[in-house]
Image (cartoon, helix red, strand yellow):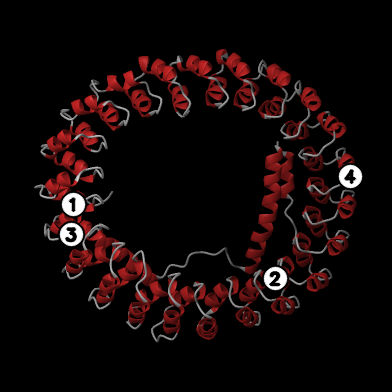
């Protein structure tokens, strides 16, 4: 298979060593995707059953039914709901309530068994969507029904026992998604797989060919008449040796190509494939990490360039083989050899003077370069080579000094970003005439604090932003930067968890409301700033203060009577409310405040008991959903028949 020259032609652009590595990996991935294209098939996609999709949509609609008994639904889903209440709710006339019972993690198995006979299909399907599957007897009853969506849910569930899967595969009511789900289910026993071989279509057999099916199944699939099925067996690392041996002689090149790339293919078979008439097969063989070194050496003199290039890429290739490829007529093969860490030092030195840029760039990316080779590359006429070298994670001090005055600013910038660049070179680069180079010094985490401090007076905003985001910048420098009235810069500072309270206070002195909101949420926000927010005119700021766990209790109590319901909601959600505040908020005239209190999991039983009798159904619903609500209160709410329409979600 011909490797597209576009991969290495990209090397003619400016590259760092990491981007070179990326291109190498991309080349390997592209080989696989090209094979998939040849197969005429894409990567595995999730197959959604029409019936399962409809059922899922129906279940979603049921859980958000309008109008609906939302309080009962919330109580039924609450893990603390008493078993007696769940039993009563399982008989509720609303299917939404019965489905909510099944969604409860503590729903007993006897209720699931009872609801198998429910008249609503959505409820029966909800049994299989619960957190824990019911016992085998219940599952078998579900498998005896006549609804395809139930069968599909059972077949697709990874914990459905083999006994149930056997019933499903023999069921007279079958859909394509059911068979696909059975094929993909890891619990499907061998007899189910054998039946799928007989009744399944091409897609079912393809799924089986790609999975960890039994050796006998894969042997049978290796004889399939469909090209795609055979190709996927050939690429399956779990395929038995005999299947791979048989497929290695297949008339279609695509199948042999898959065998050649399979790491499980027997060595003798790999040796035979080295003589395959199709170069695409030999390319896959040359890229296979399990191909013996002797076979790779044989392929290193293959007449087709792409085969030799693949050998040069292969980390399993021996040094002697790579040294020969370092002299190959193909520039792509030489570049791949230059990038291979097993290439010997002498060959690397030779390739460092190669006439093709991609080859010398590959050399410049190596981390094992000698000082002499680095200096040779530092004097290379192409800035693209010097750019890669400047970013080399093992650049030496001597090489850095040779590159610090490079005429190409991007080379100096790459050196300025490199954590291995010595201090004296970084100091010179911090005074560079190009602001992007100075910015790169500011971004370098290895830049010393004193150097970063010297950059705080730079005229370029980009440089200041760089040192503001650098984790090595000290507090004094950050405090100076905080004095700049630049909203973008200040937002960068506020992303730092180590930002001092002094810097926050500096920004608060002249910041607007939006900035104060951000300041208040910072963990190092000074107490005096939080306290000042309590008396701000903007209710958003007062609400932010109420939400802070560091706000003193007396100030939180002060906000309890705030004229803004938004602020009182924030107070009601606090975990630090005293009992007097809790009791006062129970009688707040705004239902959203009481709802916020009902949602608070730190509320004691007496508060939740009072809220369970609230006149507003939304408050009672929040109480029913609260995991801190006592069982006796939930039993009461489980009888709440209020039905109302809630706004649809946007």
Foreground label between 2 and 3: 3
**Nearer the observer, 618 or 358:** 618
**Residue 30 position by quadrant:** bottom right
> Is 168 on the left-hand or right-hand side of 335?
left
> Is 221 on the left-hand or right-hand side of 120?
right
Residue drawn at x 28%, y 21% is 531
Cα–Cα gap, marks 1 and 2: 61 Å
Q: Earlier in the sequence, mark 2 or mark 3?
A: 3
**Residue 457 position by quadrant:** top right
Secondary structure of the residue carrying tag 3 is helix
Residue for badge 2: 254
Secondary structure of the residue carrying tag 4 is helix
Secondary structure of the residue carrying tag 1 is helix
Cα–Cα gap, marks 2 and 3: 60 Å
The disc placed on residue 621 is 1
The disc placed on residue 347 is 4
**Residue 424 position by quadrant:** top right
Residue 552 is situated, as x and y percent measured from the top left of the image, at: 27, 25
Residue for badge 3: 72
Query: Mark 2 and 4 residues: CB-CB less than 8 Å, in contact?
Result: no
- In the image, residue 571 sits, relative to residue 339, either above or below, namely above
Cα–Cα gap, marks 3 and 4: 77 Å
Q: Earlier in the sequence, mark 3 or mark 4?
A: 3
Secondary structure of the residue carrying tag 2 is helix
Q: Earlier in the sequence, mark 1 or mark 4?
A: 4
> Is 238 on the left-hand or right-hand side of 383?
left
Foreground label between 1 and 4: 1
Cα–Cα gap, marks 1 and 4: 75 Å
Residue drawn at x 88%, y 38% is 353
Cα–Cα gap, marks 2 and 4: 36 Å
């Amino acid at each position: 298979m011909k490797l597209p020259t576009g991969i290495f032609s990209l090397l003619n652009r400016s590259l760092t060593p990491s981007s070179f590595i990326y291109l190498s990996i991309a080349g390997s991935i592209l080989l696989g995707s090209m094979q998939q294209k040849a197969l005429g098939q894409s990567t595995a996609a999730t197959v959604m059953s029409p019936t399962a999709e409809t059922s899922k949509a129906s279940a979603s609609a049921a859980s958000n039914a309008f109008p609906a008994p939302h309080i009962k639904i919330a109580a039924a889903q609450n893990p603390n709901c008493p078993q007696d209440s769940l039993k009563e709710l399982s008989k509720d006339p609303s299917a939404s309530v019965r489905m909510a019972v099944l969604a409860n993690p503590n729903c007993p198995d006897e209720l699931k068994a009872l609801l198998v006979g429910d008249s609503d299909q959505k409820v029966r399907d909800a049994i299989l969507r619960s957190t824990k599957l019911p016992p085998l007897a219940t599952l078998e009853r579900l498998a005896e029904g006549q609804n395809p969506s139930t069968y599909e849910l059972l077949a697709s569930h990874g914990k459905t026992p083999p006994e149930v899967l056997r019933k499903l595969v023999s069921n007279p009511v079958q859909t394509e998604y059911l068979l696909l789900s059975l094929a993909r289910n890891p619990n499907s026993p061998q007899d189910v797989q054998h039946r799928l071989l007989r009744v399944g279509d091409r897609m079912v057999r393809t799924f089986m060919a790609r999975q960890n099916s039994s050796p006998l199944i894969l042997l049978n699939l290796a004889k399939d008449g469909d090209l795609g099925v055979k190709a996927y067996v050939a690429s399956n690392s779990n395929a038995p040796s005999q299947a791979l041996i048989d497929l290695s002689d297949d008339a279609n090149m695509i199948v042999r190509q898959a065998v050649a790339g399979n790491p499980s293919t027997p060595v003798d078979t790999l040796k035979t494939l080295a003589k395959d008439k199709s170069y695409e097969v030999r390319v896959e063989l040359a890229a296979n990490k399990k191909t013996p070194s002797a076979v790779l050496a044989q392929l290193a003199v293959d007449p087709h360039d792409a085969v030799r290039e693949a050998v040069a890429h292969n980390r399993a290739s021996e040094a002697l083989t790579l040294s020969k490829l370092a002299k190959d007529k193909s520039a792509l093969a030489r570049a791949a050899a230059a990038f291979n860490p097993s290439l010997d030092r002498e060959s690397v030195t030779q390739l460092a003077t190669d006439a093709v840029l991609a080859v010398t760039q590959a050399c410049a990316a190596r981390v094992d370069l000698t000082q002499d080779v680095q200096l040779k590359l530092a004097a290379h006429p192409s800035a693209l080579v010097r750019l890669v070298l400047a970013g080399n994670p093992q650049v030496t001090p001597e090489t850095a000094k040779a590159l610090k005055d490079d005429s190409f600013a991007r080379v100096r910038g790459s050196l300025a970003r490199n954590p291995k660049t010595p201090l004296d070179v970084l100091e010179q680069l911090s005074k560079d005439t190009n602001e992007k180079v100075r910015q790169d010094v500011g971004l370098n985490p290895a830049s010393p604090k004193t150097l970063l401090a010297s950059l705080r007076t730079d005229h370029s905003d980009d440089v200041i932003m760089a040192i503001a985001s650098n984790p090595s910048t000290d507090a004094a420098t950050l405090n100076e930067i905080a004095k700049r009235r630049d909203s973008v810069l200040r937002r960068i500072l506020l992303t730092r968890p180590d930002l001092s309270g002094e810097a926050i206070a500096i920004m608060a002195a002249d910041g607007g409301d939006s900035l104060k909101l951000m300041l208040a949420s910072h963990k190092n926000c000074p107490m005096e700033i939080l306290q000042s927010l309590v008396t701000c005119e903007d209710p958003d700021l007062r609400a932010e203060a109420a939400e802070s766990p560091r706000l003193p209790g007396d100030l939180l109590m002060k906000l309890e009577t705030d004229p803004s319901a938004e602020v009182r909601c924030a107070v009601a959600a606090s975990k630090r409310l005293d009992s007097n505040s809790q009791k006062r908020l129970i009688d707040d005239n705004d239902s959203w405040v009481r709802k916020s209190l009902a949602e608070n999991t730190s509320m004691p039983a007496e508060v939740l008991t009072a809220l369970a009798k609230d006149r507003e159904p939304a408050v009672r619903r929040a109480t029913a959903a609260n995991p801190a609500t006592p069982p006796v209160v939930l039993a009461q709410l489980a009888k709440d028949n209020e039905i109302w329409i809630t706004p649809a979600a946007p």
